[in-house]
C-alpha cells in the first residue's frame, strides 16, 4: 500500500500562499468545514450550478465514521503497529436521501462535517459575512487575510475497503506535525461519539470509481481475500476551516460569525437568515448595547468560562455588590484566599459587562488570574463550566471573607438534642469562620444522617452547601441482563433484564431477578460468572457490591431447590473434538463449548445417575427429529429410557473397559458415546472416568465437577447455538438510536435525598463499634439560600470510560416549590424559586460548546453565546443541553 501511494492534492492547481486573497474565488482545494455552517449558507443562497460536476456531488455523498477495529484488514494492522496514528473507517451510505429524512436537522451536535470545493467555500463565506463590510465600495468579495490564516492543511491517507464499501482513513503524525495533528485527534475521535461527513467535492466518489476499475482489472490475478482489502493508498490534503470551539452548532440557532470565532475583526455573522438580523443585540464597536447585554470573547476554548461568568454576572445581589464598593471587604490576610486578586478580576470584568454601550469584552485578565491560582484551567483546553463555577464561588468567598481570624470550633454530635437546636449551633459555628457575600446569597444547609449497619449508631450533622449536585435517576440505577437456567430440564435458558441500584449489593440482584422470574418459596438462585465456557466465580456473598460486575461480563443464574441438607451440586462442562492445521499438519484437540449446566445430586449416586441427570438437563437443547439418538429417547423434557446398573439393561457404555476409548489408554471417545470424567473446577484435568455401576464419592463435597466429551455423532442432534448463547450484562447501543430519556427535576431531587449506602471508597468510622463500615446515608434540606444553584450530573467518569447523558430534565421556570422537601418549616422565608440563568452544554465530552441563557429585563430571555447575544423565547429555555440551573427565591408580598 505504501509504495503505490498517490497525492490527490498535487493534482489540483493550488494558488500560492502569498496570493490566496486574489485567487480565493478560483480556489480548487478541498475544504473540511462544519456541516451546519455549510448548510445554513446553502439553504439561503443559490449555489453556482458549475460548482459541482455531477448531481451526486451537489447532493453530497454521506459517510458514517466508525472505529477501525470494527473491520478486519490492513488498517486494523496499521492501527496496532503505528499506535500514534489516528485510524478510522468511513462507511458510504448508499441512500443519502434516507439519511437526510431520518435525521432532519443535522450538524446539531457539532459532529457532522462537509467536504466542499474551494469555490463553494468562498460562496458560503460570502453569505456568512456582513455584506456592508464585505461588499463596500462596490468591490467584489475577497476572503480576508484573517480568513485565510484560519485555514490549516491536514493530510489524510485513504484506501478503499471493498468488502464493506468503506474508506479506510489514516492520519499520520509524521504527515501532520505539531498542532494540526493535535487538532485532528480532537476532531476525528470516534471513541465516545460517531460522526458523519458529507462530500460535495466529488473527490471520494472519484476515488471509488477509479478503485472499481482497478478492482476489475486486478480480479484476474488476485485471490478473493486479497481483493477484499488490497488498494492504492491516496494522500488527500484537506483545508480545515471553522472548527474552533466557538463555532459549534446547536439546535435552533445559527453559528457565530467566522470572524468572531477566530477573533478576526473584518467579518460579522448575520446570525440568522433573512430578516432575522434585527433580533440580535449588536455589541460591536460603535453600537450601543443594552446594560448587561455585552458578550464575552472566546479566547480559545473558553466558552465554558464565559457561560459560568455570564450566569454569575446576572445574579442580582452579586451585581449590586460588585457594582458597589466591594473593595473594602477584600481580605488580604486570608491564607485560603488569593489576596483578593480573583475578586478584583471578577469585579472588574462584571463592571465592563454592565458598562453602557459596551462592546464584547475580552476576559484576558480574569483568564490569567484563573490560570495562576487554578493551574487546571490554564492553557486553552476545554473544561467543565460547573468545575469553574465551584472554584470561582469558593475563591470569591475566601477573598471576600469578612472573618479575619478564624476561630477553632470542635464539631459536636447531636446527642439526641432537638434538630433545630443542633442545626442552629452548626450554622453559628459556620458563620463564625465564614462570612461573605457568597455565604449571604449562595449558601444553604442540609441535614446528614448516618446509621451504622452493625451497631445501629445514628450520627446527625448539619453541613453547609454552595450548590446541589443532583444525580439523574437513570444514573442511580443500573440495567443488567442475566441468563436463567432451570435445573429441571423443562425449559430452555431465558435472558432476564432487571434494574438494580447502581451501588447496590448482590442481594439486590437476587431479589430483583427472583421477582422477575416468579421464584418459588422453596427455590433459590445461584448466580455465577461465565468466561471461556466455564464458571470463574460464584456471586454468593449477599453483601458484595454490584460494582464488581462489569458491563461486558456474562452471568447465569441457576434455579435450584433450596438445600435442605448437605446435598452436593454437580457442574457439567462440555468438550468437543476440533481439527485444525498447525504448521501445515492437521491435528485434533479438545475444545470447550457451551454454558456449564448444574443441578442438585442425591446423597448417594453412581455413574448412571450422573449420566441420566445430564440427559435431563440437555433435553431443552435437543433438536426434535426422528431417530435423533440411537440408544435412548428424550422427549417432553425427561429421559424415557434411563441407564441403570442392572444386568441385561440397555445402556451406552459410558465406562466399559472394553470400549475403544480405553484401548491402549487413548483418551478419545468412540463415535457414538458421551464420555464422563471427574475434573477440576476449570475443566482442564481429567481425574477419573466415570463407570456406570461404580458409586461416585460425594461425601463432604459441596460441588462435583464433571467433564463431558462429545462425539460428533451426538453434536448434530442438539442446538449448540442455544447452549452457547449468553448475552453480556449490559450491551451498549453504540450504533443504535435510543429514545431520549426524560425526567423531572423533582425526581432528580428525590434521588439526591433518598437513603443509600455509602460506597466502598467512602467508609465511615463508627464511634460506637469503632470500625469502618458502609453506613446508610440520608440527606435532608434544612436551610435554603437566596440563590439556589443546581448542578445536573450529566457527566460520568470511570477508570476506563467517560460518558455524557443526553437526558432531558424537565425543570420548572416560574415556580420551583421546595416546600415538600425541606425538613425545617420556617415561616420567615419562602421556599419557592424562579429560574434566572442556565449554563448549557452542547455536544459530546471533551468537546462541544457552552452557552448561557439569562433572564434579563422584564420577561425577556437572552442567549449569551460568547460574543454573540440575542433574545430567545422562553419556550426554548428547556432543552437537554441544560447543565447548571440558577434559581432565585421568590419575594412574596
Image: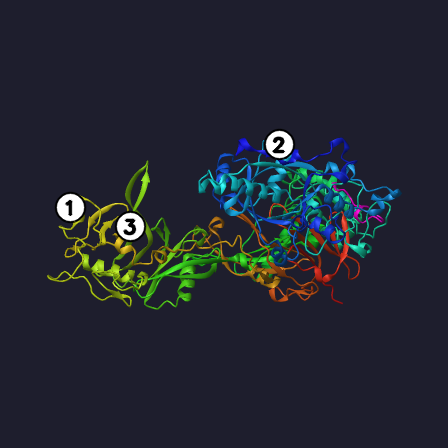
* Dominant SS in magenta: loop
* Left or right relative to 692: residue 215: right
Give how far across and how far down residue 101 sits, in percent: 63, 58
Residue placed furthest toward the right: 137
Give how far across and how far down residue 258 sits, in percent: 75, 44
Circle 2 residue: 177
Q: Quadrant of residue 642?
A: bottom left
Residue placed furthest toward the left: 647
Q: Nearer the viewer, residue 262 or 461?
A: 262
Give how far across and how far down residue 409 sits, in percent: 60, 48
Circle 1 residue: 663
Task: Compute the Cα span from label 2 to label 1.
Answer: 69 Å
Q: Is residue 471 magenta?
A: no
Image vertical order of residue 16 relative to residue 320, above or below: above
Q: Is residue 545 visible?
A: yes
Mark 3 and mark 1 residues within 8 Å of each other at the beta carbon: no
Task: Determine which of the numbered discs, if any, sits on residue 575 in the image.
Answer: 3
Image vertical order of residue 2 relative to residue 834, above or below: above
Q: Is tag 2's residue or tag 1's residue first in the polypeptide sequence? A: 2
> Which residues make up the magenta segment?
352-363
Task: Compute the Cα span from label 3 to label 2.
Answer: 53 Å
Mark nearer the viewer, 3 or 1: 1
Amino acid at each position: 500500500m505504501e509504495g503505490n501511494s498517490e497525492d490527490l492534492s498535487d493534482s489540483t492547481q493550488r494558488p500560492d500562499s502569498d496570493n490566496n486573497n486574489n485567487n480565493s474565488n478560483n480556489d480548487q482545494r478541498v475544504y473540511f468545514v462544519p456541516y451546519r455552517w455549510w448548510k445554513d449558507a446553502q439553504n439561503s443562497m443559490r449555489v453556482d450550478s458549475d460548482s459541482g460536476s455531477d448531481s451526486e456531488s451537489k447532493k453530497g455523498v454521506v459517510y458514517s465514521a466508525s472505529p477501525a477495529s470494527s473491520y478486519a484488514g490492513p488498517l486494523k494492522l496499521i492501527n496496532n503497529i503505528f499506535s500514534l496514528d489516528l485510524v478510522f473507517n468511513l462507511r458510504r451510505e448508499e441512500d443519502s436521501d434516507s439519511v437526510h429524512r431520518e435525521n432532519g436537522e443535522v450538524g446539531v451536535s457539532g459532529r457532522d462535517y462537509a467536504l466542499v470545493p474551494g469555490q463553494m467555500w468562498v460562496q458560503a463565506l460570502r453569505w456568512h459575512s456582513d455584506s456592508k463590510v464585505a461588499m463596500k465600495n462596490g468591490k467584489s468579495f475577497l476572503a480576508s487575510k484573517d480568513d485565510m490564516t484560519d485555514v490549516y492543511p491536514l493530510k489524510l491517507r485513504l484506501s478503499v475497503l471493498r468488502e464493506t464499501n468503506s474508506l479506510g482513513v489514516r492520519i499520520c503524525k509524521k504527515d501532520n506535525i505539531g498542532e494540526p495533528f493535535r487538532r485532528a485527534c480532537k476532531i476525528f475521535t470516534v471513541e465516545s461519539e460517531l460522526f458523519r461527513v458529507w462530500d460535495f467535492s466529488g473527490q471520494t466518489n472519484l476515488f471509488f470509481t477509479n478503485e472499481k476499475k482497478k478492482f476489475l482489472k486486478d480480479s484476474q490475478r488476485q485471490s478473493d481475500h486479497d481483493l477484499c482489502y488490497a488498494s492504492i493508498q491516496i494522500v488527500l490534503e484537506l483545508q480545515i476551516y471553522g472548527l474552533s470551539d466557538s463555532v459549534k452548532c446547536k439546535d435552533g440557532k445559527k453559528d457565530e460569525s467566522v470572524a468572531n470565532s477566530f477573533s478576526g475583526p473584518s467579518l460579522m455573522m448575520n446570525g440568522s437568515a433573512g430578516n432575522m438580523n434585527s433580533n440580535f443585540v449588536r455589541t460591536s464597536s460603535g453600537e450601543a448595547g443594552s446594560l448587561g447585554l455585552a458578550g464575552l470573547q472566546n479566547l480559545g476554548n473558553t466558552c465554558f468560562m464565559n457561560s459560568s461568568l455570564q450566569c454569575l454576572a446576572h445574579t442580582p445581589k452579586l451585581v449590586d455588590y460588585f457594582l458597589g464598593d466591594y473593595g473594602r471587604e477584600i481580605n488580604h490576610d486570608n491564607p485560603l484566599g488569593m489576596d483578593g486578586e480573583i475578586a478584583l478580576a471578577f469585579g472588574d470584568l462584571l463592571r465592563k459587562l454592565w458598562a453602557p454601550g459596551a462592546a464584547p469584552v475580552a476576559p484576558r485578565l480574569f483568564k490569567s488570574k484563573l490560570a495562576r491560582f487554578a493551574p487546571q484551567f490554564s492553557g486553552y483546553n476545554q473544561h467543565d463550566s460547573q468545575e469553574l463555577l465551584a472554584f470561582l464561588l469558593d475563591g470569591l468567598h475566601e477573598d471576600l471573607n469578612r472573618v479575619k481570624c478564624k476561630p477553632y470550633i470542635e464539631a459536636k454530635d447531636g446527642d439526641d438534642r432537638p434538630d433545630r437546636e443542633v442545626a442552629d449551633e452548626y450554622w453559628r459555628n459556620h458563620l463564625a469562620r465564614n462570612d461573605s457575600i457568597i455565604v449571604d446569597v449562595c449558601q444553604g444547609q442540609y441535614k446528614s444522617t448516618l446509621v451504622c449497619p452493625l451497631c445501629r449508631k445514628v450520627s446527625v450533622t448539619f453541613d453547609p452547601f454552595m450548590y446541589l449536585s443532583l444525580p439523574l435517576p437513570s444514573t442511580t440505577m443500573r440495567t443488567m441482563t442475566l441468563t436463567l437456567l432451570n435445573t429441571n430440564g423443562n425449559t430452555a435458558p431465558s435472558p432476564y433484564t432487571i434494574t438494580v441500584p447502581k451501588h447496590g449489593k448482590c442481594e439486590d440482584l437476587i431479589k430483583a431477578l427472583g421477582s422477575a422470574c416468579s421464584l418459588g418459596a422453596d427455590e433459590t438462585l445461584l448466580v455465577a460468572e461465565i468466561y471461556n465456557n466455564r464458571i470463574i466465580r460464584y456471586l454468593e456473598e449477599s453483601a458484595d457490591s454490584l460494582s464488581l460486575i462489569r458491563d461486558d461480563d456474562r452471568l447465569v443464574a441457576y434455579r435450584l431447590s433450596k438445600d435442605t441438607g448437605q446435598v452436593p451440586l454437580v457442574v457439567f462442562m462440555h468438550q468437543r473434538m476440533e481439527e485444525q492445521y498447525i504448521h501445515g499438519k492437521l491435528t485434533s484437540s479438545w475444545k470447550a463449548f457451551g454454558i456449564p449446566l448444574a443441578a442438585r445430586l442425591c446423597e448417594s449416586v453412581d455413574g448412571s445417575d450422573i449420566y441420566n441427570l445430564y440427559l435431563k438437563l440437555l433435553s431443552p437443547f435437543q433438536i426434535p427429529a426422528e431417530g435423533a439418538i440411537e440408544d435412548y429417547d428424550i422427549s417432553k423434557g425427561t429421559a424415557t429410557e434411563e441407564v441403570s446398573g442392572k444386568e441385561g439393561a440397555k445402556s451406552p457404555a459410558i465406562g466399559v473397559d472394553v470400549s475403544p476409548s480405553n484401548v491402549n489408554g487413548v483418551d478419545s471417545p468412540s463415535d457414538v458415546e458421551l464420555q464422563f470424567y471427574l475434573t477440576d473446577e476449570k475443566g482442564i484435568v481429567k481425574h477419573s472416568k466415570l463407570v456406570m455401576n461404580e458409586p461416585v464419592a460425594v461425601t463432604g463435597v459441596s460441588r462435583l465437577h464433571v467433564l463431558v466429551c462429545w462425539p460428533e455423532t451426538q453434536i448434530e442432534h442438539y442446538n449448540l447455538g442455544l447452549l452457547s448463547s449468553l448475552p453480556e450484562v449490559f450491551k451498549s447501543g453504540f450504533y443504535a438510536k435510543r429514545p431520549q430519556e426524560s425526567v423531572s427535576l423533582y425526581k432528580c431531587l428525590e434521588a439526591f435525598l433518598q437513603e443509600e449506602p455509602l460506597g466502598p471508597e467512602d467508609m465511615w468510622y463508627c464511634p460506637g463499634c469503632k470500625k469502618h463500615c458502609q453506613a446508610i446515608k440520608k440527606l435532608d434540606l434544612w436551610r435554603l439560600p437566596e440563590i439556589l444553584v443546581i448542578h445536573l450530573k450529566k457527566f460520568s467518569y470511570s477508570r476506563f470510560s467517560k460518558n455524557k447523558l443526553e437526558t432531558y430534565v424537565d425543570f420548572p421556570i416560574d415556580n420551583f416549590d421546595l416546600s415538600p422537601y425541606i425538613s425545617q418549616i420556617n415561616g420567615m422565608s419562602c421556599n419557592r424559586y424562579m429560574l434566572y440563568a442556565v449554563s448549557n452544554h452542547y455536544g459530546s465530552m471533551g468537546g462541544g460548546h457552552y452557552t448561557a441563557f439569562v433572564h434579563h429585563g422584564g420577561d425577556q430571555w437572552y442567549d449569551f453565546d460568547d460574543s454573540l447575544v440575542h433574545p430567545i423565547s422562553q419556550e426554548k429555555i428547556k432543552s437537554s443541553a441544560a447543565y447548571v440551573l440558577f434559581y432565585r427565591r421568590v419575594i412574596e408580598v
